[in-house]
Amino acid sequence: MNRVFKALSDPTRRRVLQLLRERPMTAGELAAHFPMHKATMSAHFSVLREADLIAADKQGKSITYRLRISVLEDALLAFSEMVGIGFSLSPVTDRPIEKGAE
Amino acid sequence: MNQTVKLIVIAAFAETALAGAVALAWVAHRAGGLDIAHLHRSIPPLLWMSPLALGAAGLVFWRRLANRPELPDRNRAYLNSALLTGAIASALTQNLFVYGFVIGWQPDQEVFVRLAIAGFGVWMIILGNSLAKLDPPIGDAGTRTATWTRSLLRMGWATVIWGIAAVAVALVAPLEWMRPFVMVLVLAIVSFELIHRRTTRGQNA
């Protein structure tokens, strides 16, 4: 559960989950929605995968991500989105990202 | 749902249905016949609740857990265990009531029914919570992933809300509410499953 809280505490990761709610997307499609380096996005995906909130299907060179979320996790996502919990953490250092750093 | 789980759920459904029918025959024999006009009041809820719940759960999970037996899946194993545990607990509760009745044990039926419905509600919450974690089926029978996830998440939410309502009703509502509540619950689950099948029909990947 700790991993789920960690994953949901970041607005970027929450936005990724919201996008995946519409349809499964490739890593490239998801990354196009964020002004971040691909490596940073990849680290965010890996945090979400560790928390078992998304699943990855590899087809050739591209990875397609899809939502894999329980009702409780969905409720937590909606709650953290509603109250705006958290600030962007670097998935690499686990520290708050300073503006302009990404 | 693998063959073992399927077999155990079918066996539990058949056993509880048979035990319920035999107990009903026993009641009728002792009372010199059944009061057909008041049949719905004369059958103790615990005789029919268990086979009804097992039948509805079996119907829903038959399809949801059917199509990826070749892939190891932690969530699928979790749901299988929850389904099996609930099926066995449900059958044991009903059997305890039936055999207790035959040997003359007279438990407080209201407490028994309330506990059974609360347990059923908790079971629904556990099953519904993890429903959308299931991987979509693959191959010719596969549904589009987006439809699959959206539909199961919606179904999971409905199941969890029903489960919470069942626990609340079991704790605070008058006993007369129980029978219609459980009937509506089971009918709603079956309808939702049928609607889901219609929605996903023809959307093969």
Image (cartoon, coloured by chain):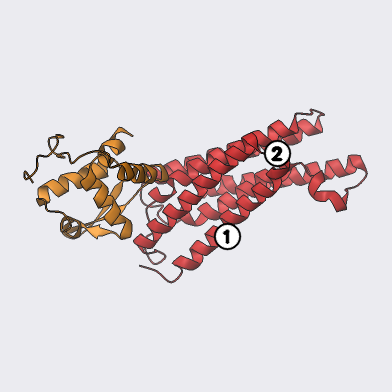
Q: Specify whether A85 is left or right of B117.
A: left
| Camera sees residue B120 | no
Residue at point 91% right, 41% down? B31
Residue at point 50% right, 42% down? B125
Q: Mark 1 points at which residue?
A: B191
Q: Quadrant of residue B172?
A: top right
Bin the neighbour count of mark 2 within 10 Å (Cα to Cα): few under 14, some 14-19, many 20 and up.
few
Q: Quadrant of residue B75?
A: top left
Q: Mark 2 lies on which chain?
A: B
Residue A66 picture location, percent across and down: 29, 54
Mark 2 element type? loop
Residue type marked 1: Ser
The answer to whether marks 1 and 2 mark residues whose Cβ atoms lie closer than 8 Å is no
| Camera sees residue B170 | yes
Bin the neighbour count of mark 1 within 10 Å (Cα to Cα): few under 14, some 14-19, many 20 and up.
few
User: Of B149 and A87, which appears nearest the observer?
Assistant: A87
Residue A96 picture location, percent across and down: 14, 36
Q: Name the residue under label 2.
A: B174
Outermost residue toward the bottom in this view: B202
Chain identifier, red in the render: B
Residue at point 40% right, 54% down? B68
Q: Which chain carries label 1?
A: B
